[in-house]
Amino acid sequence: MASLISDLLDRLHKEYVENRSGTPLQGVPSLEGIDEDAFGICIAMADGQIYESGDTDVEFCIQSISKAFTYGLALCDQGKERVDATIDMEPSGDAFNEISLHPVTGRPRNPMINAGAIAASSLVAGQSTAEQTERIHSLYETYAGRELGFAADVFADEMRDGNRNRAISYMLAENDKLRTEPDDAVEVYLRQCSVLVTCRDLAMMGATLANNGINPVTEKRAIDVGLAERVLSVMSTCGMYDAAGEWVAEVGMAAKSGVGGGILAVLPGQLAIAVFSPRLDEHGNSVRGVAACRRLSKDLELHALHVT
Ligand code: GLN
């Protein structure tokens, strides 16, 4: 089985490395030097066993994949009732940076788009942005099972050019959906987006979710079981932005992508797949990442609703 998975990853890597379609994230100057050709695929089993192929050690910004983990922290800090009163969990069908608040309740549609993610960051416990950021960063490290870096230059660029996120945050404040000041909520959110991970880190973070919230190597708990189930549920319906419906049909795994080029897909109790490749499709999802996840789901029969 082990060599079967390793061989499959090498084969898929070789096949999809030829695909040079898509464009890396534009408009963030500090990301301009990024190696567009980088491509890594990693599978982490729920028991911590790793299979990998390609550039699985290259660091990149976690970006929107962070939204899933911070949502879990907000649930843990504030409880489901308060979080649910603040953030809905319906797929929006909108782009990730849509200013989409419910016309009656004022709630952002879900925590996987920027509006819901900024609200979730604001709900993280802490007296200051520094304290909230520190709690988020160290939680990600618990998921990954090692210390993680921070891309200060990317953060600075996104803060400087963050008017759209600030607009979203002020709309949230207007609707009483923030616990902190709108500028502070954006700062915490953009700091979490700039946490650096490798493909292997991301796979291990997913394996922690797959392993009932416990990192299978360090055996440290990152999230309660019931909350892990909630995070995975919302990932499966809302994690791939406006491509979420197609993703569920084609791949059938809880997933989250980020504009840094990462995609994380999780099958509870079994495994997590992480792919890194910076060229993005029109939804902001990694082109090779989507292709590799589709194939792995098919070839390894990972679709959660698989019918035999
Ligand atoms: N930092 C980016 C933003 O807020 C993250 C978006 C993403 O990965 N989709 O616009």
Image: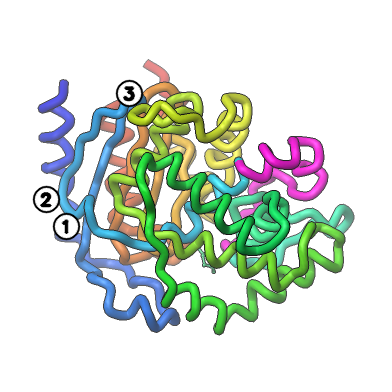
Q: Residue at x 44, y 35 (%)?
A: 253
Q: Badge 3, how many Cα within 10 Å: few under 14, some, many 20+?
A: some
Mark 2 highlights which residue?
14
Residue 144 position, x and y percent, is 39, 42
Q: Residue at x 39, y 50 (%)?
A: 263
Who is closer to the viewer here, 238 or 220? 220
Residue 135 position, x and y percent, is 57, 50
Quarter-of-image position of residue 227: top right
Task: Answer whether labels 2 and 1 touch (C-beta < 8 Å).
Answer: yes
Who is closer to the viewer here, 128 or 244? 128
**Dot 2: element:** helix
Relative height, residue 30 to residue 238 (above, below): below
State whether label 3 is within 8 Å of ligand 1: no
Mark seen at residue 17: 1
Q: Residue at x 34, y 41 (%)?
A: 203
Who is closer to the viewer here, 131 or 184? 131
Sequence-wise, the earlier of marks 2 and 3 is 2
Q: Quadrant of the C terminus?
A: top left
Q: Is residue 78 magenta?
A: yes
What residue span does the magenta drawing correspond to? 73-96
Q: Badge 2, how many Cα within 10 Å: few under 14, some, many 20+?
A: few
Mark 3 highlights which residue?
47
| Amino acid marked by disc 1 | Val
| Amino acid marked by disc 2 | Lys
